[in-house]
Amino acid sequence: MNVLLLTHSYWPEHSPPQRRWQALTRHLRNRGWALTVVAPVAHYSFGPDYSPTTRGRVLRRQTGPLGERILRVPFITGRDDRLSKLLDQLFTAAGSCVRALTCPRPDVVVITAPSLPLMAAAWAAAKLRRVPLVVEMRDAWPNLVTDSGVALGLAQSVINWAVEFVQNHADLVVTVTEGFAETLRERGVTSVATVRNGVMLSRTPALPPVPLRSRLEVLYLGNHGESQRLERLIDAARLVGEDMRLTMVGQGSQKAILKAYAQSRGVDVRFLDPVFRDEVFAHYEAADSLVISLRDDWRSFEATIPSKTYEVMAVGRHITGVVKGEAARILEAAGTGHIVGGTAEEIAQLWRRLAEDRGLLAVDDAGRRWVSAHADYKDLADQYDDLLTDLLGATPGDHDLQPANEGRKPNEQNPDEHRESAS
């Protein structure tokens, strides 16, 4: 059976939809699924596999690292500000709709949001191709539109109506948290299921115990955006002083602002560029506590779990959880660290305690066991397989597409192919 996936970002970019769908594809292909991906030419959040060859070309079919077929559409810009991203997503969504209508007919169309224009493109493509539509909501849209102030007044009303229209008319809506699934059910969406984000546990090492260090090493590794409110970490590090060091690894729209913020307050924060694969775990091992952070003034984030959460839980390091709602409940249930309030003083109080009593940093393998039971991509792919099979029934539609390079091992025919990132 053949899935047509529409996404705003895919390999060789390094992004949440890339990590999620390459992990799922690895297992879904073993269950007989073929994947065709419609995505823009790689132009944002470049991963370690990026090169002029792997970025793809418009009107040229490309084979991905797992044998998936990738169809590229043009883009406008890779800038990270809100307006530029909106214009780029509008343009690439239009191209994606056209490309979805001109490729061989699939059995099902899957859209992975939060690209809102792409949701409309996927709905139109599924409607015109007369195949089921699966809408995957990785963020709590349209609730997040209201919280973030992305649009106001009439624009906000139009966006909310459009998102809810697609959700209500999808054959299946897949969420990554139970909380948002319940929100959709309360709003009247009848066909909703949850397939969490996760990790490939077999490729995620369990780290050795934290050694004795002269100061507390705190690490934040992930997106530096508006959603995380990372300035709180900088203020907390200033309050703790020389007994700790804060390291921030990654990229995002707020990184330059955060650097200037730390400098203006005289805080010696170590800012590092994004890392991939083994380097990620090297940073985890060099840290005493790993930070998971979401701002607490957007109500929609109570049903949001940062995508790095499960990886951090699996490696066996102490977690500083600056989160609320479902994310906090999961971390508390697993017993992998401490949940703190959202002020710099509350965060600093915890870090002072950790610096004074390093015994508080000791965590067992409870987090890894929780991930093994609930968030291993091998099992999550089984869930997706069951959902799609049930949706299509025992006799799925046309099989015009064929699995790309069927029978070969990944990277066997294309020397430019590489395995996906670990982070």
Image (cartoon, grey):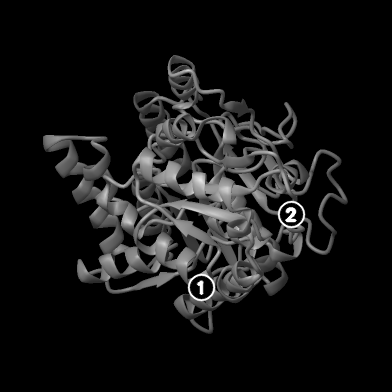
Q: Amino acid at mark 2?
A: Gly
Q: Position of residue 116 (x, y in %)?
A: 35, 44
Q: Position of residue 251 (x, y in %)?
A: 55, 31
Dividing the picture into quarters, in which one does residue 86 lie? top left
Element at label 2: loop
Which residue appears at 61% of the width and 50% of the height? 19
Report if residue 179 is visible in the image: yes
- Local packing at callout 1 (Cα closer than 10 Å; few below 14, some 14-19, many 20+) is some
- Local packing at callout 2 (Cα closer than 10 Å; few below 14, some 14-19, many 20+) is many
**Residue that lies at the very extreme toward the bottom in this rendered image:** 394
Find disc 1 in the rendering and name its residue.
388
Which residue appears at 49% of the width and 75% of the height? 387
Q: Amino acid at mark 1?
A: Leu
First-in-chain label (1 vs 2): 2
Nearer the observer, 225 or 268: 268
Q: Which mark is residue 33?
A: none
**Residue that lies at the very extreme toward the left in this rendered image:** 153
Element at label 1: helix
Gap in angstroms between the C-alphas marked 1 and 2: 20 Å
Quadrant holding the N terminus: bottom right
Report if residue 402 is visible in the image: no
On the picture, is 14 further left or further right than 204?
A: left
Nearer the observer, 160 or 405: 160
Find disc 2 in the rendering and name its residue.
67
Number of marks present in the image shown: 2
Q: Is residue 309 above or below residue 177?
A: above
